[in-house]
Amino acid sequence: MDRRGSGRLNAMLDRAAAWGQDHILRRVVRNSSYLFASNAISALMVILTSRLLGVSAFGALGAITVLVSNVNRLLSFRMSDVVVRYMGEYMERKEYDRAAALVKAAGVAEGITSLVAFGVLVLVAPLGAAFIIHDPSSTPLIVFYGISILGNITTETATGVLMVTNHYRSQALINLLQAVLVAVMIAAAFLSHAGLYMVLTAYLVGKMILGLGPIAVALYHMFKLFGSRWWRAPLDLLPPRRELVRFALSTNFSGTVNLIVRDSEVLWVSGIFNTTYAGYYKAALNIIQLVVMPINPFVSTTYPELNRAIVSRQWERLRSLIRRVTTIAAGWTGGAGLLLLLFGRQIIFTPWSFFGHPFLLFGRAFSPFKPAFLPAYPAMLVLLIGFGVANILFWNRSLCLAFGLPDYPLKVYFWGMVVKVALTLTIVRPFGPNGYIVEALLLSAFFVVTVGLTVWRGLKEIGRLSALEPAAPAGAVE
């Protein structure tokens, strides 16, 4: 090897060593890995559940769970964001009474909104059964699964506490426990030829564990951190009420925008065309989720680290963390995307032998091969662009929240939503059979534009504040 090549190799080794010594990056990666295993099991369970129920009942299951989730999210104020933003700041400053008061207020507010959400669900359940599931007899099933809202009564607040205190391993164990238990229950349902009710019960048990588990663990750590009387912290220690309400409302509105633009895509396609095209689109989205899934845990684990670095004025540490997590996300997303681009048809739509029978990842199991879902492939490639950008720059909104700028991403997402919905209603149908691909293009464009603008604003704030405020010593952030 010549001197130039040797120098490049040494530079690469030095860079790798620097990454290994970055304790904040190690903490983010370690915490993300804790949350990944249960996500992988849950993704596999979706496929197994579809095999058990068949198309119609699986669709009813999806409609019930999504309806309940959307009603809850519509009234949710994403208290985990509020807790991370303010409790994280108070813990860095050792203002423990204020941190306790913040958690207390967040828990009470979330508990009230959860009760309201359950009441709203009971009222809208008959409408959902009649007009979405097209089966009025499914009303009791909707209310039954809606109990999960009560099981998650203060889960967002609890999750925020665990994020601030770096107890991701506890979250991961809870997630893994529920994933394994749900898998066992669904396997039992499969062996006993059970139907929708048994599967819905398994999903409900999983949601209850995911809801009550973090609450119990967070309460334990709150008593350990602040003592047995933490819940008596006076509420006059809270930030100005207008600031707190504005932050909470902005996170709620941001979730509502995502609900309309991102999480209702299959409904848009089904409403404009029919369930066949909705099936293509849903298959494309499910494939893309396999690319997004490994990076999703980084969103919740990176946010507290961004917040700590900003509170401690560690601007170079902040830039370093952003560069490195972006590199990790880009490496995975680029590799997985290239694999889908080159071999997607063969991996997803070619039959695999399973005990001598052809097996499809999407489509009917153990049946003669028919490439029924092949039209999902072009939509998948288009969606890969937008989801790829959002996956690589996953920290865009978290950075603005950590800077106390919740309104900026909200405005960007809102106007992006208005334009995207207007175009969906006006230009998708005229493209006829290719309209679902146009819808995928609109969603990708929404991600590229909104994520790009949010990243630009966050990086601009780093530059502005780093020029105005002196950086803290390099070892301040732990």
Image: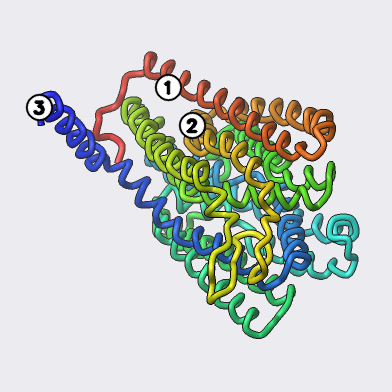
Figure colour scheme: rainbow
Total numbered labels: 3
Question: Identity of the amino acid at label 1?
Answer: Ile
Q: Nearer the viewer, mark 3 or mark 2?
A: 3
Tell me which numbered mark, 2 or 1, is placed earlier along the sequence: 2
Question: Identity of the amino acid at label 2?
Answer: Leu
In this rendering, the answer to whether 290 lies above or below 440 is below
* Residue identified by numbered label 1: 462
Question: How far is the residue under mark 3 from the one under mark 2?
Answer: 43 Å
* Residue identified by numbered label 3: 2
Quarter of the figure with the C terminus: top left
Tell me which numbered mark, 3 or 2, is placed earlier along the sequence: 3
In this rendering, the answer to whether 101 lies above or below 4 is below
Question: How far is the residue under mark 1 from the one under mark 3?
Answer: 41 Å
Classify mark 1: helix, strand or loop. Answer: helix
Does residue 130 show up? yes
Q: Please name the residue shown 63% across and 52% down the image.
A: 108
Q: Nearer the viewer, mark 1 or mark 3?
A: 3
Question: Identity of the amino acid at label 3?
Answer: Asp
* Residue identified by numbered label 2: 399
Q: Please name the residue shown 84% across and 60% down the image.
A: 133
Left-right relation of 148 to 292: right
Circle 2 crowding by C-alpha within 10 Å: few under 14, some 14–19, many from 20 = many
Left-right relation of 238 to 425: left
